[in-house]
């Protein structure tokens, strides 16, 4: 890694740590010489930088005392040591959503670290391996240097009806292609990789349940983001080239943006001390389920974006002169209700966190599924209501260049005036922000990512079905209605209900 500072503290430190790395990044069919300075990439880097600056400004919220290193570390690198740690993760995520109005890209790495803590421990317990020790050494390094960790789980998958070993092209799932006394070599690809180019290290993980025939695909390891053999192809986003135009109005949110890329791996080397799974296929599903449990309640970050969009809708209603109209007020109330419902499920999942064998805390799975399932729906309705309040001008507004034009500009300022005393440019800016979040570049992070990130809606419904324990609930109804002799299994409370009714609360 070319330019990582020994210890990164501020957002500026972080940005400088990314410079000069030998990365292969394609964008618009060309290699990018320096991603840090590319106008389409820089907003996503700024969003990650805010995760560092927040830890400086609000230390209690965005950092934690690590028992692994004894250091005060960024919360994105902290292994949760209590349910309170899980709760503070969620509060930090909402704050960062408010501050950036977009995806700040670090939740995947945080959730991967926490999921691997318990998974490596339990692999060692069964197979007498030393993955957990290796993993802890890796955590010590990244905590000391305060690095950004990306988590790469999603494979291209090819034919979805077939497993990794059944594909015509075995590289459609990332796999071990060779190994020697120094380590392993992996090939394949990881799709939809959020913040990968902005990371220092990336943890490669399997994406599906694996069988004995899929052993080569059962690999977990950490690689530098600029490792030899990695090629990134930057993903397009709606309205993304606006960031390359003059001015800052049409972008809607000129400072902050998200990032996704296709990550291609061609015989990428991972030394043994950075390998945390190698062939233990039966643990792939455990890792995926624990990661998604953490990550689905991490989607409380979208409530921070929702706060911004609610504020934008309230602002444009004021600029239009209708803030007290009853149906406008009611729509903003509904937006708030939906937003807080997301937050309620996510933070409740964290409050119900419980300790694993390794010592890490895992949030409640059922409530995590409910949180993410809400996220697949509610931001769309919040966005619809914001567009309703904003009006059609949001998508017919002329460009900033037209507003700056000596002839067209005065005409636009005359005819696009709103309430008396409101600057036309301010009205234009808030409309562009609503467009940015509901149709433009940051709709990627607020809408489509909300639908498919951490698993599409059906994935949550499957997990909810597995845990809803209808037999137990039927027995409750039968008992109260006087039915006897027709008891269903399971007759006792599930782990979910045991946590619901637990009286000792480590958070409070």
Image (cartoon, rainbow, N blue to C red):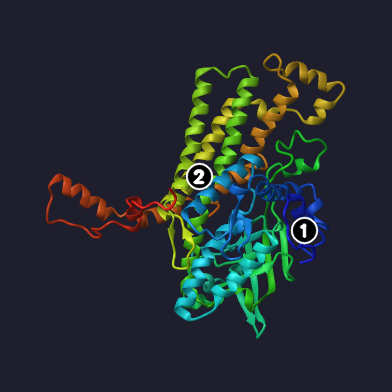
Instruction: Tell whether 320 sits left or right of 46.
Output: left
Residue of label 1: 17
Q: Is residue 202 above or below residue 60?
A: below
Binning the other alpha carbons within 10 Å of mark 1 as few (below 14), some (14 to 19) or many (20 upward) gives: many
Q: Position of residue 412 (x, y in %)?
A: 77, 20
Could one spot residue 170 in this view of the protein?
no
Could one spot residue 472 in this view of the protein?
yes
Looking at the picture, tell me which residue is in the foreground, 483 or 16.
16
Separation of marks 2 and 1 at Cα, in angstroms: 34 Å
Residue of label 2: 375
Q: Position of residue 464 (x, y in %)?
A: 39, 53
Occupied quadrant, residue 421: top right
Q: Which residue is drawn at the image coordinates 55% and 71% (left, top)?
A: 167
Q: Position of residue 271 (x, y in %)?
A: 66, 77
Binning the other alpha carbons within 10 Å of mark 2 as few (below 14), some (14 to 19) or many (20 upward) gives: many
Q: Is residue 90 above or below residue 407?
A: below
Q: Which residue is drawn at the image coordinates 31% and 57% (left, top)?
A: 494
Q: Secondary structure at mark 1?
A: helix
Position of the N terminus by quadrant = bottom right
Q: Sequence-wise, which precedes: disc 2 or disc 1?
A: 1
Looking at the picture, tell me which residue is in the foreground, 57 or 427.
57
Q: Secondary structure at mark 2?
A: helix
Q: Which residue is drawn at the image coordinates 44% and 45% (left, top)?
A: 345
Q: Is residue 182 above or below residue 48?
A: below
């Amino acid at each position: 890694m070319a330019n990582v500072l020994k210890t990164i503290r501020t957002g500026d430190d972080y940005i400088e740590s990314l410079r000069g790395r030998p990365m292969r990044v394609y964008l618009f069919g060309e290699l990018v010489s320096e991603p840090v300075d590319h106008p389409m990439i820089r907003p996503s880097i700024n969003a990650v930088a805010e995760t560092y600056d927040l830890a400086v400004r609000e230390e209690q919220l965005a950092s934690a005392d690590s028992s692994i290193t004894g250091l005060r570390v960024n919360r994105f690198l902290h292994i949760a040591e209590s349910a309170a740690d899980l709760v503070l993760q969620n509060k930090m995520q909402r704050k960062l959503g408010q501050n950036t109005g977009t995806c700040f890209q670090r939740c995947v790495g945080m959730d991967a670290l926490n999921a691997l803590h318990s998974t490596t421990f339990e692999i060692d317990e069964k197979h007498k391996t030393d993955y957990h020790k290796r993993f802890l050494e890796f955590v010590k390094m990244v905590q000391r240097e305060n690095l950004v960790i990306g988590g790469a789980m999603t494979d291209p998958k090819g034919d979805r009806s077939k497993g990794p070993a059944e594909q015509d092209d075995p590289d459609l799932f990332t796999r071990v292609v060779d190994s020697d006394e120094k380590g392993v070599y992996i090939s394949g690809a990881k799709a939809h990789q959020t913040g990968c180019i902005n990371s220092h290290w990336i943890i490669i993980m399997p994406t599906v349940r694996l069988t004995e025939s899929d052993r080569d695909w059962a690999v977990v390891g950490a690689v530098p983001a600029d490792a030899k053999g990695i090629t990134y192809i930057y993903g397009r986003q709606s309205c993304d080239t606006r960031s390359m135009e003059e001015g800052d109005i049409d972008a809607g949110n000129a400072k902050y943006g998200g990032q996704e890329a296709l990550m291609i791996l061609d015989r990428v080397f991972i030394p043994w001390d950075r390998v945390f799974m190698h062939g233990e296929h039966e643990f792939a599903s455990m890792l995926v389920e624990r990661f998604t449990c953490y990550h689905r309640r991490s989607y409380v970050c979208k409530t921070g974006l929702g706060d911004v969009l609610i504020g934008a809708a309230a602002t444009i209603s004021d600029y239009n002169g209708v803030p007290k109209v009853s149906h406008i007020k009611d729509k903003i109330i509904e937006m708030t209700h939906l937003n807080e419902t997301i937050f309620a499920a996510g933070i409740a999942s964290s409050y119900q966190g419980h300790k694993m064998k390794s010592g890490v805390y895992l949030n409640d799975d059922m409530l995590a599924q409910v949180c993410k399932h809400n996220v697949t729906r509610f931001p769309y309705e919040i966005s619809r209501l914001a567009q309703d309040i904003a009006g059609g001008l949001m998508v017919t507004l002329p460009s900033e260049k037209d507003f700056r034009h000596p002839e067209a500009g005065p005409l636009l300022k005359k005819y696009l005036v709103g309430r008396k005393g409101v600057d036309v440019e301010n009205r234009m800016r808030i409309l562009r922000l609503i467009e940015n979040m509901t149709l433009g570049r940051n709709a990627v992070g607020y809408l489509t990512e909300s639908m498919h990130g951490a698993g599409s809606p059906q994935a949550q419904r499957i997990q909810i079905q597995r845990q809803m324990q209808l037999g137990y609930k039927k027995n409750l109804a039968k008992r109260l209605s006087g039915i006897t002799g027709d008891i269903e299994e399971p007759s006792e409370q599930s782990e979910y209900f045991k946590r619901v009714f637990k009286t000792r609360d480590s958070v409070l």
